[in-house]
Image (cartoon, rainbow, N blue to C red):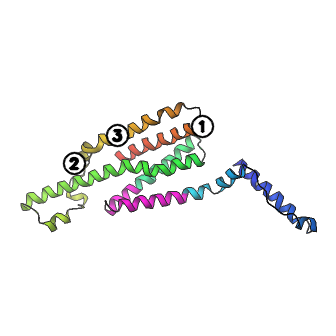
Amino acid sequence: GGRMDVMYDMRDVFAAARAGDGSTAGAELQGYVWTYFFLFSDRDSILWPLVANTLVIAGLAVAAVLGLFMPIGDIARVGLCVLVIDACLLGEMWAWEIPIDVTSFTCVAMAIGLSVDYIVHLSHAVRFEGRAAAAAAAGGATGGATAGEAGSQLFPSAGEAASAQRVTGALRKVGVSIFKGGFSTFVGICLLAASASYVFRLFFKMLFGIVILGLLVGYY
């Protein structure tokens, strides 16, 4: 941005003055260029690498936790959904002309934790619907499963239960609860839209996008 250009220009001028023509006066010029707004300019100059590093670390942390409870296939699908949400969120920032700064960066990082909540609940419910259907089918066919057979049904494949029935059952159990969670979050941030503070309005825009995108992608 403009303030970063000013910072770089001022430092270049000072560096050129120090170099000078090789005279003693130029060599003796010591110090550095600093003013208060350089705090923000220096921060903004490394913001994109900071965003990338934070999102990668947050994504890996979420994947590690999910690995304790979900199979690899489900983790990959959840990760893909989170990537879609973050990509759409960046598109929303472009459409609303939201710059990448500390506030929007914080919201983008929060998006991983907030959006994964909507997706994981439904994905987990679908998985357990398939597990229950597979167990019922195995019980009906054999008159009861051994402990080893029951363990093999922990993560049934998609072909072991009708996908439509699994999704329908999952939506019946947790669909309304997930919607209530998203709706209550939306109601909680509505007052921010009327705030006189730019930061509060920015938080509303970003959180609004996170909630809507999280619900849409999760239900899809």
Q: Nearer the viewer, mark 1 or mark 2?
A: 1
Whether residue 3 sits left or right of residue 122 in the image: it is right
Q: How many marks?
A: 3
| Kind of residue at badge 2 | Gln
Q: Secondary structure at mark 3?
A: helix
Q: Read off the residue under disc 1.
A: 198
Q: Earlier in the sequence, mark 1 or mark 2?
A: 2
Measure the alpha-carbon separation of dots 3 and 2: 20 Å
The image position of residue 34, as x and y in percent, is 76, 54
Characterize the magenta stretch by its predominant secondary structure: helix
The single residue placed furthest to the top in the displayed view is 194
Which residue appears at 26% of the width and 55% of the height? 127
The label nearer to you, 1 versus 3, is 1
Q: Secondary structure at mark 1?
A: helix
> Could you tell me residue 9's position as x and y percent?
79, 54
Instruction: State the image quarter where residue 201 is shown.
Output: top right
Give the class, few, some or many, for how many residues have Cα within 10 Å of label 2's Cα (few <14, many ≥20).
some
As drawn, is 93 to the left or to the right of 117?
right
Residue 63 in magenta stretch: yes
Q: Earlier in the sequence, mark 1 or mark 3?
A: 3
Cα gap from disc 1 to disc 2, whole angstroms: 46 Å
- Identify the mark at residue 179; answer none if there is no mark: 3
Give the side of residue 172 with respect to residue 11, left or right.
left
Going by the numbered disc 1, the residue's amino acid type is Tyr
Q: What range of the chain is rendered magenta?
A: 52-79
What residue is pinned by disc 2? Answer: 165
Q: What whole-number distance in Å separates the C-alpha atoms at marks 1 and 3?
A: 28 Å
Q: Earlier in the sequence, mark 3 or mark 2?
A: 2
Work out whether residue 220 can be spotted: no
